[in-house]
Image (spheres, helix red, strand yellow):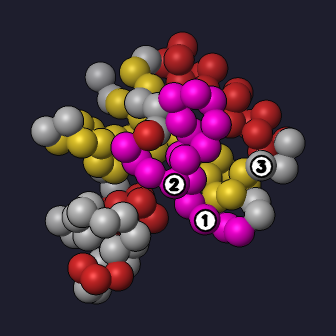
């Protein structure tokens, strides 16, 4: 079964954010809500769409993720870049201690 998280961009500053366990939004994959199953995905998409309508986030959408040693990792390379930052140099990674997009 495929796992998902929901991502979007915060309206106020454009920063990539993820739907959190508490229903809010976080900049960290670590705090994101991992969705397991179609029913839960539909519920969380509705919650994210309500946040978009309330002008909290822009164009939220689900992405496929995996668990790697307890860490959440986006499956697609594009989403890894959005989550971790540029792939060109580790010093520019968004989250301290997190791998660069290609890692």
Q: Position of residue 62 (x, y in %)?
A: 52, 41
- Rendered view: 7 above or below 32: below
Q: Is residue 51 left or right of residue 4?
A: right
Whether residues under marks 3 and 1 lie with C-beta atoms below 8 angstroms apart, the answer is no
User: Which residue is depicted at the point 36% across and 64% down?
Assistant: 95
- View extreme (right): residue: 54
- Residue 19 in magenta? yes
**Residue matched to label 1:** 15
For the residue carrying disc 3, how many other residues have a C-alpha within 10 Å: few (<14), some (14-19), or many (20+)? some
Q: Position of residue 96 (x, y in %)?
A: 31, 66
User: Which residue is depicted at the point 76% across and 60% down?
Assistant: 11
- Residue 95 in magenta? no
**Residue matched to label 3:** 56
Q: Is residue 72 left or right of residue 18?
A: left
Earlier-in-chain disc, 2 versus 3: 2
Residue range highlighted in magenta? 13-30
Q: Position of residue 102 (x, y in %)?
A: 22, 69
Q: Quadrant of the C terminus?
A: bottom left
Whether residues under marks 2 and 3 lie with C-beta atoms below 8 angstroms apart, the answer is no
- Rendered view: 96 above or below 20: below
Q: Is residue 49 left or right of residue 102?
A: right
The image quarter containing residue 31 is top left
For the residue carrying disc 2, how many other residues have a C-alpha within 10 Å: few (<14), some (14-19), or many (20+)? some
User: Which residue is depicted at the point 35% across and 82% down?
Assistant: 92
**Residue matched to label 2:** 27
User: Which residue is depicted at the point 85% across and 42% down?
Assistant: 53
Q: Is residue 61 visible?
A: no
């Amino acid at each position: 079964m495929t796992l998902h998280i929901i991502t979007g961009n915060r309206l106020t500053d454009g920063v990539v954010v993820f739907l959190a366990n508490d229903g809010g939004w976080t900049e960290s994959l670590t705090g994101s809500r991992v969705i397991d199953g179609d029913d839960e995905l539909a519920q969380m998409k509705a919650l994210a769409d309500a946040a978009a309508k309330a002008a909290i986030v822009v164009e939220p959408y689900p992405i496929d993720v995996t668990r790697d040693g307890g860490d959440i990792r986006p499956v697609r390379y594009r989403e890894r870049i959005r989550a971790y930052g540029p792939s060109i140099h580790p010093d520019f990674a968004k989250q301290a201690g997190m791998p660069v997009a290609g890692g």
